[in-house]
Image (tube, rainbow, N blue to C red):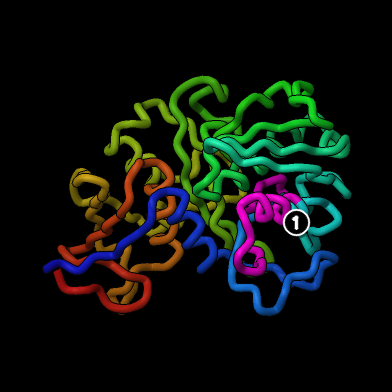
Amino acid sequence: RKQFILLFGAIAVFTYLSIQFFPQESSEEAVSVMEESKDQIQIYVLDRDNTLIPLSKGIKEGLSVEEKLEMMITYMCADQVKDDFSGVLAKGTTLKKVQVQDGIASLYFDNRLLDYEETQELKVLEALTWGSTQFPEVKQVQLFLNDQKLMKMPKATVLDRNLGINHFESATGSLHQGDSIVVYYSKTLDDVSYLVPKSKRIAGNASDMETVVKEVLNDVSVSSSLSSPLYQDKIDTMDLPTKENETLIVNMNNALLSSDRSAKQMAYESLVLSLADNFDVDEVKVYVDDNVVSIHGSNEAA
């Protein structure tokens, strides 16, 4: 029987791998985290290039999704972010109330939510949306200001991940032209590597598996500080991707492998995260030479 790597669906894969591989900040901050904390949440902060970077933060176990959302908002405020990162939310921004019902997270803020430069509005919305929808219970986000549905932010309606993240100008035109996919790129800051999701506009159909896989493997389409480990290592598919029930299967060339026949970590993570975020699947199998690849050792025999 073929051995394979079992991976969660898009949100679960993202959360799991980011917990394992995204660097974690030190806990020496105003918000204390209990030493016995074993759970993790994702927060989104800005780097010096105004790129949203996902970071893992430790929290105590057993919190409800509402409590996790409150912690997430607190950690993304300017007064809680240090080093070379900055908070996407203004200092002291308060989440007064949060409700999660029927897949919609309703976030009730105070007036400080609007303390941002106009050019940063999309970054605020992207960070709140992607941060909130990391939890399986949340599919969409609604923002409120002092118990009133927020209408001042032009783009603030009911939000979901279709909003995208880390939008840049692209050769395919404006944000409203062409389909959009999410690709994970790498970025190195002070000798630490991060996996960074970025929305990428494509000319083809985002529901076509061959098109999406091809775009995932291509280099970043704009001038930025992001790099593609898949493109740099000349990693490519050997045949068309296939989908069996809820499993996506891709066959890659040997460029994905290190000398010990294990998968190159950054390239593998970039590939799996990108595929998981773009396809509605529960599992992803990555093969090289009829073997399933792993970043933890030699390939398992087919």
Q: Nearer the viewer, residue 252 or 90?
A: 90
Could you tell me residue 191's position as x and y percent? 64, 69
Percent coordinates x, y for residue 107 in the rendering: 71, 38
Q: Is residue 167 visible?
A: no
Q: Left or right? Give the position of 88 relative to 2.
A: right
Q: Which residue is mark 1?
A: 75
Residue drawn at the location 80% of the way across and 73% of the way down = 28
The image quarter containing residue 43 is bottom right
Q: Considering depth in this image, is 111 or 261 the residue closer to the camera?
A: 111
Image-based side of 258 in relation to 202, left or right: left
Q: Which residues are magenta?
A: 48-73
Q: Is residue 218 left or right of residue 249?
A: right
**Residue 283 visible, this angle:** yes
Q: Residue at x 78, y 53 (%)?
A: 86
Identify the residue at horizontal 29%, vertical 32% (top origin): 208
Q: Position of residue 5 (x, y in %)?
A: 29, 65
Residue 12: in magenta span = no
Total marks placed = 1
Locate residue 288: give its quadrant: bottom left
Identify which residue, 152 or 64, lies in the foreground: 64
Q: What is the quadrant of residue 203 in the picture? A: top left
Question: Which of 76/136 is in front?
Answer: 136
Q: Tell me which amino acid carries mark 1.
A: Tyr
203 vs 87: above or below: above
